[in-house]
Image (cartoon, rainbow, N blue to C red):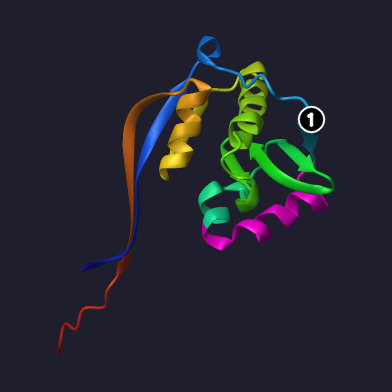
Amino acid sequence: MLEFLDVVGPASLFHLDQDGILPAHQGTGVEQLAIGDGGLTALPALSGEEETSESGLEDISSPAFCLRRGDEVVAAAGYLSVLVAPHCRGNQLAWVVASIAVAHALDAGLLSQRRARPYPSQRVAVALGFQELGAQLSVRLGDVPVDRGC
């Protein structure tokens, strides 16, 4: 017998080709950071565990593209992730860093796809020129011991 342990979603699935990108025109100041850079590791602490987990930023293996305000990294994006510090949201920073990350991925010949569950994440995908092509629902199952008797 199977037990439902967790349900994640639904999430929208988006695709973008090289000709479809709508780049942010305010991308100046975006820098590329190495994975594990101290500035990059501070951003998840500002955003909290749930939002950081949803963003996927801590698990990236792609380059990270970041914006700073002073010494603080306030927005970062990898190829499939975006995270903005709570006190800086609503200023199109997600679009700016994601635009640079997506352009970098496309220039490297990679297929650009995005999974977006929260509505703000979906808005960023659309602002970048992504087209919604489907949906995803993930279910985590576990085994439930069955008493078979003797």
Q: Quadrant of residue 49?
A: bottom right
Q: Main secondary structure of the magenta part?
A: helix
Q: Residue 132: x and y, percent?
A: 37, 26
- Up-down: is 141 above or below 20? below
Q: Residue 119: x and y, percent?
A: 41, 41
- Whether residue 36 is visible to the viewer of this picture, yes or no, is no
Q: How many marks?
A: 1
Q: For the point 53% across and 9% down, which residue is it?
A: 19
Q: Nearer the viewer, residue 69 or 83?
A: 69
Q: For the point 70% across and 53% down, which residue is it?
A: 43
Q: For the point 50% across and 25% down, which residue is it?
A: 127
- Whether residue 54 is visible to the viewer of this picture, yes or no, is yes
Q: Residue 150: x and y, percent?
A: 15, 90
Find numbered disc 1 in the image and state the secondary structure of the residue it sits on: loop
Is 86 situated left or right of 127 in this image?
A: right
Q: Quadrant of residue 28?
A: top right
Inspect the magenta stretch and tell me whether residue 39 lies in it: yes
Q: Nearer the viewer, residue 131 or 143?
A: 131
Query: Which residue lies under the disc numbered 1?
Result: 29
Inspect the magenta stretch and tell me whether residue 69 lies in it: no
Q: For the point 71% across and 25% down, which residue is it?
A: 27
Q: Quadrant of residue 68?
A: top right
Is 126 situated left or right of 106 in this image?
A: left
Q: Nearer the viewer, residue 123 or 141?
A: 123
Name the image quarter holding the N terminus: bottom left
Q: Residue furthest right?
A: 71
Is 31 situated left or right of 13 in this image?
A: right
**Mark 1 is on which residue type?**
Gly
Q: Residue furthest top?
A: 19
Q: Residues within 10 Å of mark 1 (few under 14, many from 20)?
A: few
Find the magenta span and give its range: 35-50
Q: Residue 131: x and y, percent?
A: 40, 22
